[in-house]
Every structure is written in C-alpha cells, then in structure tokens.
Image (cartoon, helix red, strand yellow):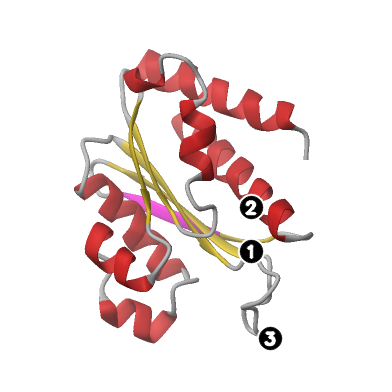
Amino acid sequence: MELDALEHAARQLADTLLKQQIMAVTAESCTGGGIAQLLTEIPGSSRWFERGFVSYSNQAKQEMLGVSAATLDVHGAVSEDTALEMARGAIRHSRGHVSVAVTGIAGPDGGSPEKPVGTVWIAWGQKLGYAEALCFHFDGDRHAVRQQTILAAIQGLNDRLQ
C-alpha cells in the first residue's frame, strides 16, 4: 500500500475536523496505535485529535473503554458488538466528538474458520451515541492487514463526516 493514500486520507480528515471544529478519538486493537500515529504525524493535529486508546487485551477493552465482559464472552473481541462498544466507549472516556475503533486478526496466527486472519471490524461513533460498524476481510501479511485497516478506518471517518 502506498503511503500517499494513507497520508492523503489523513490530511483530508484533518481538514474536515478542523473545518467542523470537532475532535477525533481512536480506539485501536489490531493496529496497535497506528491510526493515532498516522494522524499525529500531521503538524497541528492537537487542534483536532483528542486522544487514542490502544486496547489490545480484552482486559484493556473493559477497563479503558467500558466494553462489557459479556460482550467479549459471547461475541469475542473481533466482533461487531465489541467494535461498537469500543467506538462508543472512546467517546464516553474522552472529549472527542467522533471516534473510530478497530478490532481484528492481523495474523499470522489467531485466525479460525469463522474468523480467518484478515477479519477486521471497524466502527465509527459520534458524541450523541450513534455508532455503526462494518466487517472487512483484508489480504496479505500482518503489515498489509494493519495498513489496509488504518486506511479503511480513516476513509470511513472521512465518508461519515462529509
């Protein structure tokens, strides 16, 4: 994946957030903070990026974002329900107006027939409680899956803010 696509998407998001005078927050699992890193590479990002949560373990998802143990037990960490709770929790536990949350299986291990490597749930949330999530199936190695997740997460936020 070209860095240009990632940088372009990030700069578009920065412009939109600045124009709308709102702050974004991230809740990341499989990307390990990659979304926040990309966004904060942009000078002046403190004007529109509020904070990022890296909640890699289930315990961190519960403690930092308020994801319920029942959701994790019933649906698993890589699920629509968990992604939605992460997106809403990121808003609730920050001063952000919009959020993006990602949870998935980047590989090379950890996949199953039901949730193969490359399965990623991305959720986008808003301050008023609305959130939606989509499931993606990305190809490639761990790095490729993570890069595709970062791009889809930022593009999805861009699309929802237009």
Expressed as whole percent of the image width and height from the top left, the position of residue 151 reads 63, 41
Callout 1 touching callout 2 (CB < 8 Å): yes
Toward which corner of the image does residue 127 lie, by quadrant? top left
Tell whether position 37 is magenta.
Answer: no
Query: Magenta residues?
Result: 130-134
Nearest to the observer: residue 26 or residue 160 = 26
- In the picture, the disc for residue 86 is none
Residue displayed at 72% across by 31% down: 3
Residue displayed at 52% across by 25% down: 41
Marks 3 and 2 sit apart, C-alpha to C-alpha, by 20 Å
Three-letter amino acid code of the residue under disc 2 = Arg
Query: Considering only vertical position in the picture, is 31 above or below 10?
Result: below
- In the picture, the disc for residue 146 is 2
Residue that badge 1 annotates: 106
Three-letter amino acid code of the residue under disc 1 = Ala
Q: Examine the rendering and report whether any part of residue 162 can be seen.
A: no
Query: Considering only vertical position in the picture, is 157 above or below 143?
Result: above
Q: What is the secondary structure assignment of the residue under circle 1?
A: loop
Nearest to the observer: residue 137 or residue 40 = 40
Q: Earlier in the sequence, mark 1 or mark 2?
A: 1
Expressed as whole percent of the image width and height from the top left, the position of residue 10 reads 56, 27
